[in-house]
Image: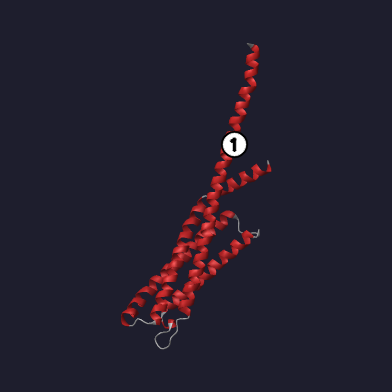
Amino acid sequence: MADLEKAATPSQGGNGDAAAGGTSGGVVASAVRRWRSLDFLDRSGSALRGGGWAFALLSFLLMACNEHGDWMQFDRYEEYRYIVAIGLLAFVYTTLQLVRLAVRLTGGQDLELKTGLLFDFAGDQVTAYLLMSALSAAIPITNRMRQGADNVFTDSSAASISMAFLAFVCLALSALISGLQAGQADVHLRISAGLRGKKTY
């Protein structure tokens, strides 16, 4: 009987180790899933800023080149000068963000994680607001012009406004992602530290 009890003792210890190992493995698997989710958000935000970069550039170029003589000169209208300025601003901002992405991908030094996420959120939000303000100012005058004359000038103006709207959509969605990432920055740091500790161990 005593022999049976002794034989049972190692078995119980083995089961305890297996349970502990299973729990540890489950925690690591959960951390890896969360890491992949955060990484997907980061890639999505970068892709949206890339789209914003392209649309802002198109909006700027379409309006800046919209010069056809007489009244068909964009610089004669304050609303169009405004959309050119904001399109250029959005282009410069998204270019800087893409440069930051390139620095991170090449292993260079970027802003501290939480500071960078807050900068992304504020920059995306402010730039998206300015784009919406610019296209909202340009739409009424373009509609009035098209009622009297529908020509290459008004078509180019409408195209520029459409590109500004698409840039706004990209940066507004990017701002939502940046806000979500900023709210989860502490989780991101804990997961990173945990995974580094696991690899070291």
Q: Residue at x 59, y 36 (%)?
A: 24
Q: Residue at the far left: name it.
A: 147
Q: Residue at x 50, y 65 (%)?
A: 51
Q: Is residue 135 left or right of residue 51?
A: left
Quadrant assignment for the N terminus: top right
Of residues 26 and 71, which is closer to you in this image?
26
Q: Quadrant of residue 147?
A: bottom left
In the displayed structure, would residue 19 be above or below residue 51?
A: above
Q: Residue at the far bottom: name it.
A: 70
Q: Residues within 10 Å of mark 1 (few under 14, many from 20)?
A: few
Q: Please give the residue where the numbered disc 1 appears in the rendered image.
A: 24
In the displayed structure, would residue 113 be above or below residue 75?
A: above
Where does residue 66 sit, x and y in percent of width and height?
45, 81
Q: Residue at the far top: name it.
A: 1
Kind of residue sitting beneath label 1: Ser
Where does residue 16 sit, x and y in percent of width and height?
60, 27
Q: Is residue 75 left or right of residue 116?
A: left
Q: Residue at the far right: name it.
A: 200
In the displayed structure, would residue 145 be above or below residue 186?
A: below
Where does residue 74 sit, x and y in percent of width and height?
43, 81
Q: Residue at x 60, y 47 (%)?
A: 192
Q: Residue at x 58, y 41 (%)?
A: 28
